[in-house]
Amino acid sequence: MYKCALVLAAGQGKRIKSDIPKVLHKVCGKEMVIHVIDTIRKAGIDDVNVIVGNGAELVKERTQIKNIEYSLQSEQLGTGHAVQCASEFLKGKQGIVAVFTGDTPLIKESTIKNLVESHIENNNSATILTSIVEDPTGYGRIIRNGNEVLKIVEHKDCNEEELKVNEMNAAIYCFDIESLCESLGKLNNNNKQGEYYLTDVIEILKSQGKTIGAFVTDFEETIGVNSRVQLAEAEEILKNRINLKHMENGVTLIDPKTTYIGIDVEIGKDTIIYPNNILEGCTVIGNNCIIYQNSRIKDSTIGNEVDIQSSVILDSSIGDNTTVGPFAYLRPETKVGKKARIGDFVEIKKSTIGDGTKVSHLTYIGDAEVGKECNFGCGTVVVNYDGKNKYKTIIGDHSFIGCNTNLVSPVEVEDNTYIAAGSTITNDVKEGDLAVARAKQKNIKGWVDKKGLKK
Ligand code: UD1
Ligand code: CA
């Protein structure tokens, strides 16, 4: 059976009090609307249409990597009206449309699959995802007669009896496409908020004798994020879910409470994560690594048996058995090889560092290609910028760069070379040579005495 999905993402999100559209607020490092899109796709629904309106350009820009279609709701007249705005997308289609809102980031792939399955098995025209919650304040209520679902009533429109109902509408549904499109035309805005509610479709379909189903799931999955408080609640729930998954996969989290792992991060077996670490984006960490306290690693690939301590690593890769930190800063496009050492207060930008090379302390390397088995003395600076342009430095294998060396780019230091401490290198150094580029030492005999400075 053909399946597609709509994601409602046009609303203003007044309650979140933000200059950016609500659905672009992040939970565990990823925009809420992208969580929803990714989960829909994982559940096997490829054809996704996002309804945009408020901040449409920004929402499109941020979601464009997901290769989806958009419908425009230029005036936000309610969730029913938002679905009406996707009528071009739905026109001529037969099958199932699953409808989501962009503010329910916790929905699980398995639940979407189960919802669709239950919809098909029961031959429903509409199936609503619901949950039971002690305090359903703010949510639409599922009104039943025995088992039969009659309608959904919004919190603000509930009478006293309806307010007591604690089965809430998750705002995730499956519809038969034709039945949905037909009923959309019959919506009105005679309610407390003066909006065209998608929820009213249920009562309309019911009045036509169509079958309505409800599929109950855990409340935790159905939280709708309307405010910053709910945003933090969602963060906490998803964080716990992610941490649990990694621990179940054989990763040690010494203090899960202070471990923040993005939803798309992968971590190998027997890796140990100490407290206060943030792993973001599409980071992949190998087996048997130790990530000591206070690191931030984003969009990076870390090999096996790597130790990292109190460092920031962005959009970089690190080979097996390398150690990083404490207090190293690896900026985008850095590639460090295997068995290398990047020590304290070392900053590396857009450079490759070969296998077995040691950059142990207080060094800056930018726009450089460094070979294998090199040793950098303390305080080396690659001078890659002349105030106008950036240039490249090349350092061959087995080079020894003495302490406090400046390598003024562009410059090439060939294999098996030595550079004397304190040198400022402006010319290439040929293979096998020692370069000394500093003033010769001169000692002035008895100077202290002569000046009368002796104590
Ligand atoms: C909605 C449901 C409510 C349910 C709750 C679950 C309706 C009328 N109510 O209420 O029953 O319990 O979600 O979280 O559907 N949007 C548009 N265009 C609009 C209005 C909203 O695209 O004109 C989008 C918003 O961007 C948002 C989603 O629809 O992503 C839901 O809108 P919101 O205002 O948050 O609805 P709730 O009041 O939470
Ligand atoms: Ca909502």
Image (spheres, rainbow, N blue to C red):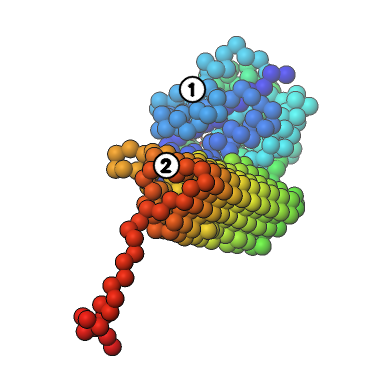
- Residue at x 60%, y 56% (from the top left corner): 323
Q: Residue at x 37, y 53 (%)?
A: 437
Quarter the C terminus occupies: bottom left
Front position among marks 2 and 1:
2
Q: Residue at x 35, y 43 (%)?
A: 385
Residue at screen point 28% across, 72% down:
444
- Considering every residue shown, the one lying at the far bottom of the view is 455
Q: Is mark 1 within 8 Å of ligand 1?
A: no
Along the horizontal axis of the image, is 305 left or right of 226? right
Q: Quadrant of residue 426?
A: top left
Q: Secondary structure at mark 1?
A: strand
Question: In the image shown, does 184 or 345 lie closer to the viewer?
Answer: 345
The local secondary structure at tag 2 comes to: loop
Residue 34 x, y percent position in the rendering: 55, 36
Q: Residues within 10 Å of mark 1 (few under 14, many from 20)?
A: many
Where does the image place residue 321, in percent across and percent down from the top left? 66, 52
Left or right of 399, for residue 169: right
Lower position in the chain sequence, tag 2 or tag 1: 1
Q: Residue furthest left?
A: 451
Q: Amino acid at mark 1?
A: Ser
Which residue is disc 2 drawn over?
Answer: 428
Say if residue 47 shows up in the picture.
yes
Q: Is residue 246 visible?
A: no
Which is more toward the observer, 134 or 164? 134
> Which amino acid does the dot numbered 2 rest on?
Asp
Residue 410, percent from left and from top: 39, 39
Contact, mark 2 vs mark 1 (Cβ under 8 Å): no
* Circle count: 2
Q: Which mark is residue 71?
A: 1
